[in-house]
Amino acid sequence: MTEQRSRSGARQLRATGLVVLVLLLAGWASAGTPKSAVTPETAGSAQAPTSLQALPKNSDDYADLTVQELADGLASKSFTLVNVHVPYAGELPQTDLFIPYDKIEQQANELPDKNAPIVLYCRSGAMSTAAAKALVQLGYSNIMELDGGMSAWEAAGHELQFKR
């Protein structure tokens, strides 16, 4: 009798899991428009297509990114990726710039225009948070910051690159 209940419970669990999976896939399939490739004309512009642009801003007026959101965004990258960690402790793939978080205001001229999408990261998220707040104060309107930084990136199973 116990074995029969166990099998019945397992069947119900599998059926529930299947329903949840179908609903998730249906939501994912209808969640948005397909990503389009970055062309030389749209690279670095505020109108460059990216799913990251739709992210809500936090109370400090920049968006917090999860590792998965950034990893997905790298597939059709249309933003500037900036490592603000000092000292150098590795980097994410496709990093465009290295600007120390405490020099971001002085080196803002290295960044694209103030409306262009810019993603900041560091080792844990503390330095990139400081840099994001500084850029918002300077008038940058499309700033995103990787929650948990490179540590979260590695914890999710992604590898860091060491090029320096």
Image (cartoon, rainbow, N blue to C red):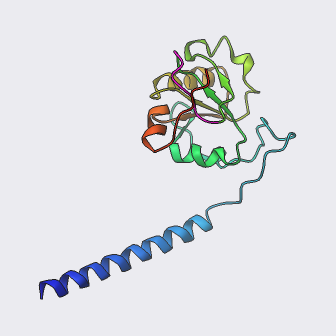
Residue 28 falls left or right of residue 53: left
Residue 55 falls left or right of residue 41: left
Magenta stretch, main secondary structure, is loop
Residue 45 falls left or right of residue 80: right
Q: In the rendered structure, does residue 23 fall within the stretch colored magenta? A: no
- Furthest residue in direction front, as rendered: 163
Q: Quadrant of the N terminus?
A: bottom left
Instruction: Give the vertical position of 128 relative to 106 (above or below).
Output: below
Residue occupying image coordinates x 39% and y 73%: 17
Q: Quadrant of the C terminus?
A: top right
Q: In which quarter of the view is residue 131 placed? A: top right
Instruction: Give the vertical position of 100 relative to 136 (above or below).
Output: above
Query: Residue 77: x percent and y percent?
Result: 70, 43
Query: Residue 72: x percent and y percent?
Result: 60, 49
Residue occupying image coordinates x 48% and y 36%: 147
Residue occupying image coordinates x 62% and y 67%: 30
Instruction: Give the vertical position of 108 relative to 115 (above or below).
Output: above
Q: Which residues are magenta?
A: 87-93
Q: In which quarter of the view is residue 96 placed? A: top right
- Furthest residue in direction right, as rendered: 41
Q: In the rendered structure, does residue 88 fall within the stretch colored magenta? A: yes
Q: Nearer the viewer, residue 20 or 54?
A: 20
Q: Nearer the viewer, residue 152 or 22?
A: 152
Query: Residue 36: x percent and y percent?
Result: 76, 53
Query: Residue 103: x percent and y percent?
Result: 60, 12
Residue 133 falls left or right of residue 142: left
* Count of number-bearing discs: 0
Residue occupying image coordinates x 65% and y 49%: 51
